[in-house]
Image: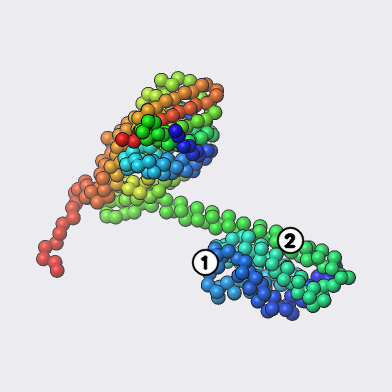
Amino acid sequence: MSIQSCVTIINEWDIVAARQLGRNVAKELGFGTVDQARITTAISELARNIYLYAGKGQICIDKLNDAGKAGLRIHAADNGPGINDIRQVMEDGFSTSGGLGAGLPGVKRLMDDFHIESETGSGTQIKATKWLR
Amino acid sequence: MEIINRVIANYIQEHKQEILKEWIQTTKETADDRVLRVVSDEVFTSTSSEFIDLIITNIKGLKEDYNNKLTDFAEKVVRLGWPLTFVTRGLHTFGQIVFHRMEESGTVNRDNQMDMVHQFDEWITPMNNEIVSIYSATWEKTVSLQKIALQELSAPLIPVFEKISVMPLVGTIDTERAKQIMENLLNGAVKHNAEVVLIDITGVPVVDTMVAHHIIQAAEAVRLIGAKCMLVGIRPEIAQTIVNLGINLNQFTTKSTLQKGIEAALELTSRKIIKVEGAM
Ligand SMILES: Nc1ncnc2c1ncn2[C@@H]1O[C@H](COP(=O)(O)OP(=O)(O)OP(=O)(O)O)[C@@H](O)[C@H]1O
Ligand SMILES: [Mg+2]
């Protein structure tokens, strides 16, 4: 079972809207302050990547309920240029924009499950889940 | 044509008080709370009267006078926070009241009715368009002024002691603001002769890689001009996410609170705060 709501990312302020949505859902589900901060930071990273590298995309927040286990899943989707070498972008410090290159590996550490799919020329899909314990 | 227009103008001028009264009453009955709640009865009446005066000036054909009045009026309305629909509906109501009264008094009759309707339309439509355009221009001006005001507030550097300055950051940091932080930090540090600059992030809701990167760059620049940068106000949950992101803040002195930061900054500049014995 899952309930979903989404924010379209086109400009910088949409990143703030996506974060706000995530924080509200996280609060609703009963996540503590530290996990709330982890979730909003992860959303911020994924939304900013969409804004910077794909130009346009979507962040959806799903409430999960899997056999009594509750969780929050961030789903970031875009139809941008895609990622050539996934292993490379998951390395700490790799950046094509002069950034810290800490975004994607950071999201993986901030969340419990992390799944990335990307195809050059057709876009990127990232799903990251945090479970409530 | 010309004559009929003057007929309308004369009628309105002669019956100004009654029209105004009826207009205020009708408007009060139909206006939503939002409009009435924000102003007192007195302000409502005087602004309404001004609105009717404006319409009369327009009818009289005093172009320059009218334009000035319209700008003043639009500014006042924006300041009062009245919605645009309130003003355009008000104009519409005004037209209806006048037409209705002129019909009742026989000034508008079966012979000239078609002409009168046409005249009314010719008179009201351009006024409506002008009001909308001035109103939105005034809004745009207000918004851009607020933007500037917000920018000035966005990253202030405050000298708190000799050689020590603090930059308290509150709210979301976007690219524009990140630029301002860097600029103000460098200019301010030079201007105030700061040896230690404290950046307080207590009020920053999310510290992601972008924010961290900008802060690191700002700190490096501060070091290049010979000062030291300290990061304070790091809430526990923010400390955790920074660690998770794998961001290295080793080059910074970090403190959990601004107070601890100030104490450390005083120590760095060979000073400390002491309690004076024997006072009171
Ligand atoms: N949605 C995306 N579409 C295309 N390329 C992407 C996308 N997301 C990330 N990338 C690529 O992966 C690289 C690494 O991303 P990551 O978020 O880890 O670091 P970064 O954005 O470069 O810097 P930062 O530390 O500020 O996040 C990016 O530089 C970019 O080339
Ligand atoms: Mg990134």
State the image quarter where residue A30 is shown.
top left
Question: Which of A29/B194 is in front?
Answer: A29
Which of B54/B43 is in front? B43
Residue B61: name its quadrant: bottom right
Quadrant into which the N terminus of chain B falls: bottom right
User: Can you say whether B267 is above or below B40 in the image?
Assistant: above
Horizontal relation, residue B187 to residue B27: left or right: left
* Residue at x 34%, y 54% (from the top left corner): B158
Callout 1 amino acid? Val
Would you name the residue on which mark 1 appears? B38
Q: Which image quadrant for residue A38?
A: top left
Query: Mark 2, residues whose alpha carbon is within 10 Å: few (<14), some, or many (≥20)?
Result: few
Q: Chain of mark 2?
A: B
Q: Earlier in the sequence, mark 2 or mark 1?
A: 1
Which residue sits furthest right? B111
- Residue A108 in the image: x percent, y percent? 37, 28
Residue placed at 48% from the left, 20% from the top?
A84
Q: Is residue B179 above or below residue A110?
A: below
Residue A49 visible in rendering = no
Mark pair 2, 1: CA separation:
29 Å
User: What amino acid is found at the position of numbered circle 2 in the picture?
Assistant: Pro
- CB-based contact (under 8 Å), mark 2 and mark 1: no
Q: Pointer 2: what residue?
A: B126
